[in-house]
Amino acid sequence: MGTLTVIYYRGQLKLDKPLRTKKPLKVTIHFEEEEKTVLSLSDFTFKETQKLLKNCKSSFSDEVIEERRKAVLRYFSTLLLFSNFITKSLARRN
């Protein structure tokens, strides 16, 4: 048949897409290990950080602030576009 991805949570399986069959299927369930991407302080060194930031002309905190500003602007731009779309859609209905 093929492969279908599901999420197991609190005793239930949730399929990632609908499955329609004409007859019962034999199913084998394999539980994958969770990927552990936990970082610790030992994963970073001061020298590595200095090397990565050597071409940075501003402070690290200024870079983070600028990145967050851009993210907020993208969010509100998307929200505004969506709002305009809904307003125009509702205006067409009336």
Image: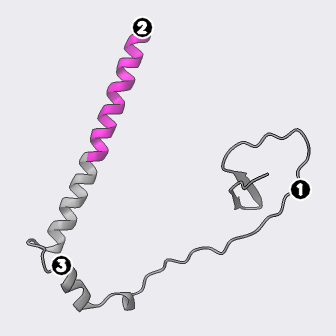
Q: Is disc 3 surrounded by few (<14), some (14 to 19) or many (20+) residues within 10 Å?
A: few
Q: Is residue 70 above or below residue 56?
A: above
Q: Residue at x 68, y 56 (%)?
A: 5
Q: Indicate left or right for 88 with 60 as reference.
A: right
Label 3 residue SS? loop
Task: Give the amino acid at mark 2.
Answer: Asn
Q: Position of residue 65 (x, y in %)?
A: 19, 63
Q: Is disc 2 surrounded by few (<14), some (14 to 19) or many (20+) residues within 10 Å?
A: few
Q: Name the image quarter holding residue 18.
A: top right
Q: CA distance from mark 2 to mark 3?
A: 56 Å
Q: Is residue 50 above or below residue 81?
A: below
Q: Position of residue 71 (x, y in %)?
A: 27, 53
Q: Indicate left or right for 48 with 92 as reference.
A: left
Label 1 residue SS? loop
Q: Name the image quarter holding residue 39.
A: bottom left
Q: Is residue 1 above or below residue 55?
A: above
Q: Are marks 1 and 2 in contact (CB under 8 Å)?
A: no
Q: Residue at x 28, y 46 (%)?
A: 74
Task: Give the amino acid at mark 3.
Answer: Leu
- Residue under circle 1? 26
Q: Name the image quarter holding residue 8.
A: bottom right
Q: Residue at x 33, y 87 (%)?
A: 44
- Residue under circle 3? 53
Q: Is residue 88 magenta?
A: yes
Task: Give the amino acid at mark 1.
Answer: Lys
- Residue under circle 2? 94
Residue range highlighted in magenta: 74-94
Label 2 residue SS? loop
- Of labels 2 and 3, earlier in sequence is 3
Mark 2 vs mark 3, foreground winner is 3
- Of labels 1 and 3, earlier in sequence is 1
